[in-house]
Image (tube, helix red, strand yellow):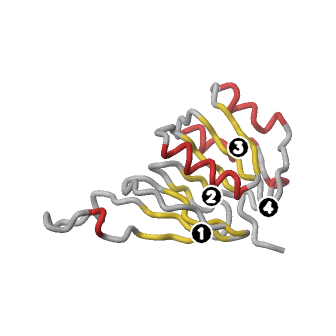
Amino acid sequence: MQVNLDKDIHSYTIRACEPGLISLTVPYTAENMPQSSSEEPASRPLGIETISGSFIVSPRHLLRDWPPASISDLQAEHFEAIIELQPELVLLGTGTQLTFPPPQLLAALHRQRVGVEVMDTAAACRTYNILMAEGRFVVAGLINPAEN
C-alpha cells in the first residue's frame, strides 16, 4: 500500500505499509534542519526510515522495538509507553487482520479516558496520517509482523 506524502516537515508520517515493513518520513529536528538561510526545508528531501517489527509512532515520537510481535503477544504493560505520551486517541494496528484484544488489556487506556480504535495495521497507518494532518494528537501502536 502506498500512502500519500504529507508536507508536514516536523512530524512523523507514514509513507508506505506492507506486511513486515512500514516506511516513515523522519521529521526535521534542530539537529537536521538546514543551516543555510537560502535552503528552504521544504526543498530538501526528508529522511526516510523503514521499520520491520512493531513500533509506536506519534507526530513527535518514534519508539522502535515495541515488544508485541503479534496480537497474542500483547500485554497490558505494552501500553505504558503509549500512556506516557498522553494521547487523545490511540490506534492499535493488529497486523494483517483485524483482531480485537481482550478488553482488560485496554483498561489502562480507558481509565485515562483515552479513545482506542482497533484495526488492521494497514488501516491504522492510513488513519494515523489523516488524524495527524487534522492536528489531532494521535498515537499508533503498530503490530507489524512479517508476511508468512
- Residue type at numbered disc 3: Glu
Mark in front: 3 vs 4: 4
The tag on residue 96 is: 4
Please tell me whether mark 4 sits on a helix, a strand or a loop: loop
Looking at marks 3 and 4 on the same chain, the residue that comes earlier in the sequence is marked by 3
Label whose residue precedes the other's in the sequence (1 or 4): 1
Q: Cβ–Cβ below 8 Å for labels 2 and 4?
A: no
Disc 2 target residue: 55
SS of the residue at dot 2? strand
Q: Residue 72's quadrant in the figure?
A: bottom right
Q: Which mark is residue 77?
A: 3
Secondary structure at badge 1 equals: strand
Q: Which residue is mark 1?
A: 51
> For the residues marked 3 and 4, what is the alpha-carbon distance in whole angstroms?
23 Å
Asked if residue 52 is positioned above or below residue 94 in the image, the reply reads: below
Three-letter amino acid code at the position of disc 1: Ile
- Using the numbered discs, state the Cα–Cα distance from disc 1 to disc 2 in whole angstroms: 8 Å
Q: Earlier in the sequence, mark 2 or mark 4?
A: 2
